[in-house]
Image (cartoon, rainbow, N blue to C red):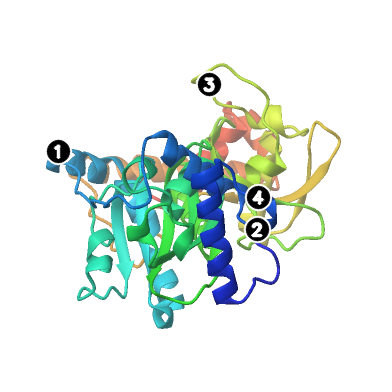
Amino acid sequence: MLSAALPPPAERQALIAQARTALLSQGQVPAALGIEPWIVRSWQRCLALGRAPGQRVAFDLVSVAMLRNVAEQHRHLLQAARPVLAHLTRAIAGMHYFAILTDTRGVVVDVQGALDRHDARVRAIGRVGIDLSETTVGTTAIGAALAELQPVWLHRGEHFFNDNTSYSCAGAPLFDPQGQCIGMLDLTGVDVPERPELRHLVARSARAIEDALLLQLPHALLLRLNWPGSTLGGEGDGLMLLDADGYVVGTNRTARQLVPQPARAPGTRPHAGDLLALPWPLLFDAALQQQRSGPAPMDMPLWSGLRLQGMALPARPAGQGSGLARAPAPAHAATSAPLREAETALIRQAVQDARGNVAEAARALGISRATVYRKLGAPKGH
């Protein structure tokens, strides 16, 4: 982590220059110079590839075929990222920084913000399809975030190649709902003052993109989790999605930290009953109750003995709250809709007759609690 107080800019640049000289002459950097170890590791990787700081850097586009593949592969990431990027670029609008989204290889998949296209240094990197990996352009926040899997801040001479020492950048990795790195988010400025606080902003924005990507997945139940005493419903919540049978569809980074997941065979999914020390159908019961009475925290014990608090929320119908018009239902759906509506009405009546006891209603109907929830929680006509 960066120290709380950085040296004055001129002194800091002098320390960075000393560190670069020490690395090239001695193969190591004295700790007293204050260069973060991950930067030194990146410099050393560049040297191991036979690179020298004075070499020219070519910011080349990947092939057209690879670019098409990148766009197709990351369409869900782009959909999740763009609303977050819109807020992010407003936050940095007056600082002459712009946002770059890359895939796991460091290939740019989106660029947003105020880009000065008259500046060749901005044009060099502010294009979709540019390969900004460490092996291609040396030490950058992009390569470092993907290698270290942590948020980073990099300023001017901390870049390996001399051609890149006008850039300052903050970066954070992006993880998918299964916890695999799928890319990174970067904020870059050219000839700008040092702003290490951007590391926090880019990390927060990366988490927001991850949460939006998670919530795109089809699911039956959303669990919001946090420690007792925390306010549920904010950006600090752990998010866990379940299907109608209680299997985990995906989680966000906070949920993976709050709820340890046991080892399992590749290709298998954890079950809520393996993670939470309570009968998992109770989660669906709680979601139905909250539909009637409003959201309320509930106790979420873990098998370790620790206890979380959480809320079980039904999946929202697709497009709800987005302002998007629903597509018209196909003809075959229209003809079967009355049957589904009758089925739903029957289930609702059974729950009402059981005075809200979902287990009793399910027994009376000869179906599972999860089925009751799925039928009542689905949007009409689905």
Asked if labels 2 and 1 touch by Cβ distance under 8 angstroms, the answer is: no
Dot 2 or dot 3: first in sequence order is 2
Give the number of the disc on residue 34. Answer: 2
Kind of residue at badge 4: Pro
Give the number of the disc on residue 65. Answer: 1
Q: Secondary structure at mark 4?
A: loop
Q: Nearer the viewer, mark 4 or mark 3?
A: 4
Q: Nearer the viewer, mark 1 or mark 2?
A: 2
Dot 1 or dot 3: first in sequence order is 1
Q: Nearer the viewer, mark 2 or mark 3?
A: 2
Q: Secondary structure at mark 2?
A: loop
Name the quadrant of the N terminus.
bottom right
* Image position, residue 109 (x, y; %): 29, 52
Q: Residues within 10 Å of mark 1 (few under 14, many from 20)?
A: few
Q: Is residue 71 above or below residue 35?
A: above
* Image position, residue 244 (x, y; %): 53, 34
Give the residue drawn at x 51%, y 45%: 25
Q: Which residue is mark 4?
A: 30
Inter-mark Cα distance, 2 to 3: 45 Å
Q: Which residue is mark 3?
A: 268
Inter-mark Cα distance, 4 to 3: 47 Å
Asked if labels 3 and 1 touch by Cβ distance under 8 angstroms, the answer is: no
Q: Secondary structure at mark 1?
A: helix
Inter-mark Cα distance, 4 to 1: 45 Å
Q: Nearer the viewer, mark 1 or mark 3?
A: 1
Can the viewer see residue 200? no
Q: Residues within 10 Å of mark 2 (few under 14, many from 20)?
A: some
Dot 4 or dot 1: first in sequence order is 4
